[in-house]
């Protein structure tokens, strides 16, 4: 299909893409295209200038040595095939779309769209990750907690490319859960990531699809940290049913859900409590 009036620039390297991005007003980046092409097909986006970034090798790097740096062009398929430096991120990648979508869709595209239903995003929140943005003026790092400002809104400036996300290796005690209207190829009704970083004595809870942005659940995090303080951070434990229920209640209380076509606010709170309780039971046994 020829769309009249669209110019396309194929980026050769990051500098070339950034130069083009800063010189053309209202340019749109294209990575895997699994969000952007849907927007174009439904008439919700009509880009006049597209910068294709899927060949920028620098953004395909995945570095791990205690600190993880995942390039924006790492696809879901790679998160499954390589060690992505986070077990929860791998679990999230497994739930995304179909094999075709996982082959094309990227971490940077999930961050670029910044949907509250983006499945990598609760994991980045729970990992306390940092988003690395680059423009011609240089690089800046934004805590994921400060990255999203609303549904599909972020602090990314029009002349910036998301080049990577970074986080500390939090160890194996982490998980991701998602509830949808069916088991596969489904947008989340609610999602939850739980990370227990035993070495740093830190608990992170990220909630997806239950607020205008991805949310953290600080009271649930504090409560779980108290359980690990008591049991010993380096020990496996079996939280009691009472403790799991309370953790679930606190996680659900942090949500700001709405009723929409995918589910009601009440249902979202219910499944968050169930997922949080199960996630705690699962993660507490991993040392
Ligand atoms: C059938 C189907 C099923 C899906 N299932 C899921 C699912 O289960 N879970 C889920 O989370 N998502 C799902 N998605 C959405 C989509 O696959 C993901 O959001 C994916 O991560 C988008 O990545 P992309 O590289 O294809 O992004 P693109 O479509 O290329 O770009 C998306 C947006 O981000 C911008 N962008 C891309 N890369 C960058 C960058 N490096 N820096 C700044 N901005 C950038 C683009 O300009 C665009 O606005 C699905 C989509 C489809 C079509």
Image (cartoon, helix red, strand yellow):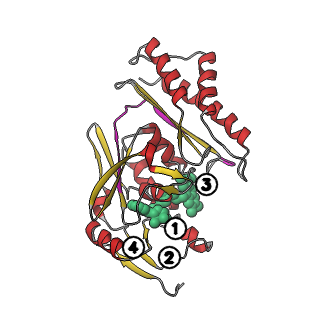
Looking at the picture, does residue 141 appear above or below residue 251? below
Q: Do the CB atoms of the residues marked 4 and 3 lie less than 8 Å apart?
A: no
Q: Position of residue 228 (x, y in %)?
A: 46, 18
Range of magenta residues: 163-182
Q: Secondary structure at mark 4?
A: strand
C-alpha span from label 2 to label 4: 10 Å
Question: Most extreme residue toward the top, as rendered?
Answer: 230
Q: Do the CB atoms of the residues marked 2 and 3 lie less than 8 Å apart?
A: no
Q: Secondary structure at mark 1?
A: helix
Of the numbered discs in the image, which one, if any, rests on residue 51?
Answer: 4
Whichever of callouts 4 and 1 sits on the residue coming sooner in the sequence is 1
Quarter of the N terminus within the rendering: bottom right
Asked whether mark 3 and ligand 1 are closer than 8 Å, the reply comes as yes
Q: Residue at x 72, y 51 (%)?
A: 260
| Label 2 vs label 3, nearer the camera | 2
What secondary structure predominates along the stretch shown in magenta? strand
C-alpha span from label 1 to label 3: 17 Å
C-alpha span from label 4 to label 1: 12 Å
Q: Position of residue 74 (x, y in %)?
A: 38, 55
Asked whether mark 1 and ligand 1 are closer than 8 Å, the reply comes as yes
10 Å crowding of disc 2: few (<14), some (14-19), many (20+)? some
Of the numbered discs in the image, which one, if any, rests on residue 275?
Answer: none
Looking at the picture, does residue 201 appear above or below residue 128? above
10 Å crowding of disc 4: few (<14), some (14-19), many (20+)? many
Q: Do the CB atoms of the residues marked 1 and 2 lie less than 8 Å apart?
A: yes
Of the numbered discs in the image, which one, if any, rests on residue 47?
Answer: 2
Of the numbered discs in the image, which one, if any, rests on residue 185?
Answer: 3
Question: Residue 161: within the magenta?
Answer: no
Residue beneath disc 1: 36
Q: Secondary structure at mark 3?
A: loop
| Label 4 vs label 3, nearer the camera | 4
Quarter of the C terminus within the rendering: top left
């Amino acid at each position: 299909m020829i769309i009249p009036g669209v110019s396309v620039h194929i980026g050769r390297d990051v500098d070339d893409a950034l130069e083009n991005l800063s010189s053309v007003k209202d340019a749109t980046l294209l990575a895997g295209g699994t969000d952007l092409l849907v927007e174009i097909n439904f008439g919700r986006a009509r880009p006049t200038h597209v910068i294709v970034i899927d060949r920028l090798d620098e953004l395909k790097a995945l570095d791990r040595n205690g600190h993880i740096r995942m390039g924006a062009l790492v696809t879901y398929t790679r998160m499954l095939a390589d060690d992505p430096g986070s077990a929860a991120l791998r679990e999230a990648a497994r739930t995304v779309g179909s094999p075709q979508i996982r082959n094309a869709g990227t971490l940077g595209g999930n961050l670029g769209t910044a949907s509250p239903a983006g499945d990598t995003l609760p994991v980045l929140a729970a990992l306390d990750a940092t988003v690395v943005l680059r423009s011609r003026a240089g690089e800046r790092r934004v805590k994921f907690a400060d990255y999203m400002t609303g549904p599909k809104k972020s602090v990314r400036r029009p002349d910036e490319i998301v080049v990577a996300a970074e986080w500390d290796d939090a160890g194996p005690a982490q998980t991701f859960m998602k509830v949808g209207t069916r088991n596969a190829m489904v947008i989340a009704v609610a999602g939850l990531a739980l990370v227990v970083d035993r070495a740093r004595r830190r608990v992170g809870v990220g909630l997806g699809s239950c607020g205008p942005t991805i949310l953290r659940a600080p009271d649930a995090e504090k409560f779980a940290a108290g359980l690990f303080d008591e049991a010993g951070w380096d020990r496996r434990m079996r939280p009691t049913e009472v403790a799991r229920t309370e953790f679930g209640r606190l996680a659900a209380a942090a949500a700001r859900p709405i009723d929409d076509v995918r589910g009601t606010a009440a249902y979202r709170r219910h499944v968050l409590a169930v997922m949080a309780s199960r996630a705690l039971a699962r993660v507490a046994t991993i040392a």
